[in-house]
Image: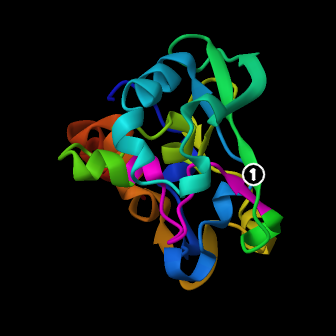
Amino acid sequence: MPGYEIHPRLLLSEPMQRCKLHSCRAACCLYGVWIDKFEADVILQNADTIQGEMREAWRDPTGWFDDRKEEDEHSRSGIVFHSRVIDLSSHYGGSACIFLRQDHKCALQTAAHKKGLHPWKWKPFYCVLHPLFLDEKGRITLDDTDLLLDEAGSCLRPSKIKIPLLTTFEEELRYFLGDEEFERQRSLIP
């Protein structure tokens, strides 16, 4: 997926680290996700594989997306749909994306992995990107540190030491930038 640029902030070091799935239990899946039309089509084309990774009550592909649809200048098709959000009292905030499994993993990710594909092959762009986002210029960046660390359901936790943001988000940034561009950016860290 090379072709993205990063905001200069990602070259800084900050006192934060990623959460661990066993601790946060996928709190980020609370509100579901916007999914590009092309991504939704791929998800539906692979429904047979994905269904086996989902909770039984949610396996019907006709219920995987709700009626929300928006234009999105950063998405490949320019149109995004929203994953269905279901009531789930055991999850942070009492709701979750329909693709959230009982073990707090994403059914889209585990299904792709079982097929021998990159785990993010069927995962929506905005899921992989989170908690990063695109700024007004389409560059990958991160919200204000204090806001992120104050949110109980944040994907980030305080760290006793400052860690380069490129290191904290290395997996995602390598995926979006490609190895060569990632290494070039890493060489720019002050």
Look at mark 1 in the image and give the residue it sits on.
Answer: 86
Residue at x-position 37% and y-position 56%: 170
In the structure shown, which secondary structural element does the residue marked by tag 1 occupy? strand
Q: Specify the quadrant that holds the N terminus.
A: top left
Magenta-drawn stretch, dominant element (helix, strand or loop): loop
Question: Which of these two is toward me, 136 or 37?
Answer: 37
Q: Position of residue 3 (x, y in %)?
A: 37, 24
Identify the residue at horizontal 66%, vertical 50% (top origin): 97
Residue 59 seen by the camera = yes
Q: Residue at x 75, y 64 (%)?
A: 88
Give 150 or 184, whichever is nearer the viewer: 150
- Magenta residues span 95-109
The x and y percentages for residue 119 are 32, 49
The image shows residue 163 at horizontal and vertical percentages of: 47, 72
Q: Nearer the viewer, residue 186 or 108?
A: 108
Identify which residue is drawn at 39% across, 63% down: 167
Amino acid on which the number 1 mark rests in the picture: Ile
